[in-house]
Image: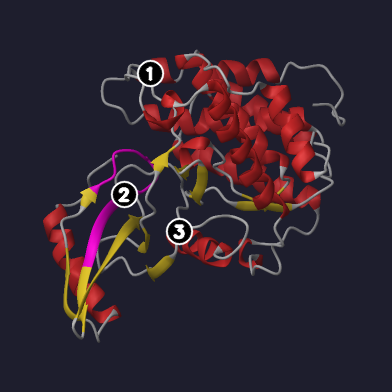
Amino acid sequence: MVQRTDSEAKRVKLEAWLRTKLPAAEALSIGPLEKATSGYASEIHFFDLNWREGDHEKTENLVIREAPTELQIHPNYNVGTQFNIMRCLEGSSVPMPRTYWLEEDDKVLGAPFFIMERVEGDILNPIQPGEEPWGPLFEASPDQRSRMWRQTIEVIANINTIGRESRGLSFLGVPRDGTDAIDRQISHYEHMWKWGGVQPQSIFDAAFAWFKSNRFEPEHISLCWGDARLGNLIYRNSEVVAVLDWDMAHIGAPEADLAWLLSIEWMTSETIGAWDGVPDREEVIQCYEEITGRRLQNFHYHEAFAMLKLSILFLRVISTIPGIPSDFVASGDLPPVKRLAEMLTWEGENDNQV
């Protein structure tokens, strides 16, 4: 992650801002800002908020999430949308951190931000290439890993079946129909591709043409998490206790979330190998269908589109890493790009196959 500003200067400004939000709090102060060690799309810090109410000392463990200004992965990063999604889902079947304040004026800290509860637990994040094995997934037995995965699929199923209208999520944009939902996603990632200058152009030109010519009417439209993966879950006492990172959320075909989960798992297994207890593709699909009571529709299309998104995001990130040759990035010889090209040569019919 990019450290955009001096943390002490930011702490002083944040403390002054919080006094305006809690004018009745006595002796309000915040502790040092602790930068998160992972994440690309935003700048995240943890901190303790301390104040006094009468004779009682109070402390809250909080998180501040700011919009990026240095390393921008998404062209339209909106902390307000994320904050409002999380607030709408509080108290639902989807476990959410409590949200506190949203500030969309970038004059306060240099970028819009929001503040939420810090949920204690472990991130279910697979190790990265070159790292020593660590964390709850590594330490778990195969049976425990299997349960962690099932809980992840249950979370996705709950998101995809939640009453989006009753939860006030219409601000995300209501597609005219299922085809419009597909078109919106195609348009969004085509814009991201062109905005990010991602190469090679020939592969992405052909890919977007394929997705446009093979579009269809989804059977279901739902809230989609967008970044559906184990690394965006907090796990404590054998339970998922918080769902994080809503920067890719949208209203669309629910199959998109499961396809993204499988694309991330494919990338992980390609780089560090598979672990015992992690279900294969068919097991994941079967579990999701059992929980939701729905058959996945046109799933090859969604898996291919997930690989398109992964390719664009992957190339956007590595293009910002110092020392990576630009011709290597543009060669098309990277795992997700090669996999995308392979998937688009699939000659089956665009039907209900999975």
Q: Are marks 1 and 2 in contact (CB under 8 Å)?
A: no
Image quadrant where one finds the N terminus: top left
Q: Amino acid at mark 1?
A: Pro
Residue 297, horizontal then vertical, whole percent: 82, 36
Q: Which residue is mark 2?
A: 43
| Of the pair 293 and 196, the residue shown nearer to us | 293
Q: Is residue 36 magenta?
A: yes
On screen, residue 329 above or below 114? above
- Circle 3 sits in a helix, a strand or a loop, which is it? loop
Q: Which one is earlier in the sequence, the residue at label 1 or at label 3? A: 3
- Going by the numbered disc 3, the residue's amino acid type is Pro
Q: Which residues are magenta?
A: 35-49
Residue for badge 1: 129
Percent x, y of residue 265: 56, 25
Dot 1: element: loop
Q: Which residue is mark 3?
A: 97
- Count the labels in the image: 3
3D distance between C-alphas at marks 1 and 2: 23 Å
